[in-house]
Image (cartoon, rainbow, N blue to C red):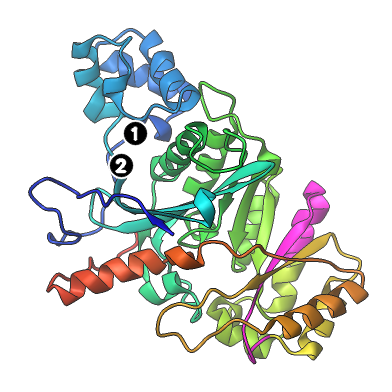
Amino acid sequence: MTILPVIPTSPDQPDAVAVRRRPSMPPRHLADLDLAARKTAVTTLGEPAFRAKQLSTHYFGRLVRDIDEMTDLPAATRARLTDDLLPTLLTPVREMACDDGATRKTLWRLHDGALVESVLMGYPDRVTACVSSQAGCGMACPFCATGQQGLTRNLSVAEIVDQVVYLAGVAASGAVTGSPPRLSRVVFMGMGEPLANYPRVIEAVRRLTTPAPEGLGLSQRHITVSTVGLVPAMRRLTAEDLNVTLALSLHAPDDDLRDELVPVNQRWKVAEVLDAAFEYAARTGRRISIEYALIRDVNDQPWRADLLGKLLRGKLAHVNLIPLNPTPGSKWDASPKPVEREFVRRLRETGVSTTVRDTRGREIDGACGQLAAGELTEASAGGAAPDAEVAQ
């Protein structure tokens, strides 16, 4: 494991949460706006309209986030545009790397003190960014570190996009060992429930997939949006005419257990959630990814594998089994390998495509929310209180 330098939030305040603030949305940023709105913004500031394309080319095309590095802009122009279009949204608190540099995790502090995480994962043929869509999460899944923190607030479009642009820059620098120098995939599987921040997540997806310089130019087919099963939002997504992958965090095939593991199941039951997922697959032709965290002696029984196979047989769906990355102090643990292999065998026997997710980041608190939880714990032990849980 490599621990990268801890970067203080300010020279006078090197510790984490010394100042208590109410959660609030950040100032406007270039990434919140489409190209037409950027032109309006720069002309309102007294700059020529072509400055919007210049800024966009730097940010989305060259992955430059610091306006002082945009040296083709006059110094006076840079000063004028900084606060209005390129304010600092994310301040790194801690960066860690493991897997010989192929996995890198960043803990960010937002302008109001809220904490979020993002992860960069390199493979021989691709580089994937896992990003957060909320600070904390209101879904309260008991085995998830983020779910234990509760919801602080939604992220803005730019706070989401800025994570991706930063990680794309890390990939472009060649820092991800043994991988191509270009970010190719983004998964909304970090902190938060993406579909609970629906308008901003969809706008972020559009910004990430619009060709440069207006956006980052990623393929929609290489974007994955996860959900625990917010059925109205899933149906809304079906009507968006997007070709992203929908990932459903199922974790149990029966309502009795899923009511406990994924509390939103008390509102939308397994059958209704799967129906909404299958509607998305039928509309888009995109295979649904069924996320299933295998938890020892909880949801890993052979009969549950058989039931899951029965529910998915013949459907456009793939099961992604996730060896649980336990959080500190949790009663939940990963299933033993023989149990995992039997679960896979039974699913495949029913004809359901199944893989086991590559385990990454255990050395760096890789489960979503672990770094943030640790930072909040340290801050609380030092006498500082975390921000109130208020969604914006």
Give me the C-alpha separation between circle 1 and circle 2: 8 Å
Q: Is residue 66 above or below residue 258?
A: above
Q: Is residue 379 above or below residue 161?
A: below
The x, y position of residue 189, in whole percent, is: 55, 58
Q: Is residue 1 above or below residue 241?
A: below
Report crowding for label 1: few under 14, some 14 to 19, many 20 or more residues within 10 A (C-alpha). many
Q: Residue at x 51, y 34 (%)?
A: 174
Q: Is residue 85 magenta?
A: no
Res 389 seen here: no
Q: Is residue 280 magenta?
A: yes
Image quadrant for the C terminus? bottom left
The x, y position of residue 222, in whole percent, is: 67, 43
Q: Residue at x 82, y 48 (%)?
A: 285
Image quadrant for the N terminus? bottom left
Residue 374 falls in image quadrant: bottom left
Q: Residue furthest left?
A: 12
Mark 1 — residue?
A: 29
Numbered disc in front, either 1 or 2: 2
Q: Is residue 136 above or below residue 162?
A: below
Q: Indicate the amino acid at tag 1.
A: His
- On residue 88, the disc is none
- On residue 89, the disc is 2
Q: Indicate the amino acid at tag 2.
A: Leu
Q: Is residue 100 left or right of residue 70?
A: right
- Could you tell me which secondary element the residue under label 2 belongs to? loop
Res 89 seen here: yes
The x, y position of residue 70, in whole percent, is: 33, 17
Q: Residue at x 50, y 60 (%)?
A: 196
Q: Is residue 281 left or right of residue 42?
A: right
The answer to whether the residue labelled 1 contacts the one labelled 2, judged by CB atoms less than 8 Å apart, is yes
Which contiguous range is marked in magenta? 276-299
The x, y position of residue 356, in whole percent, is: 72, 67
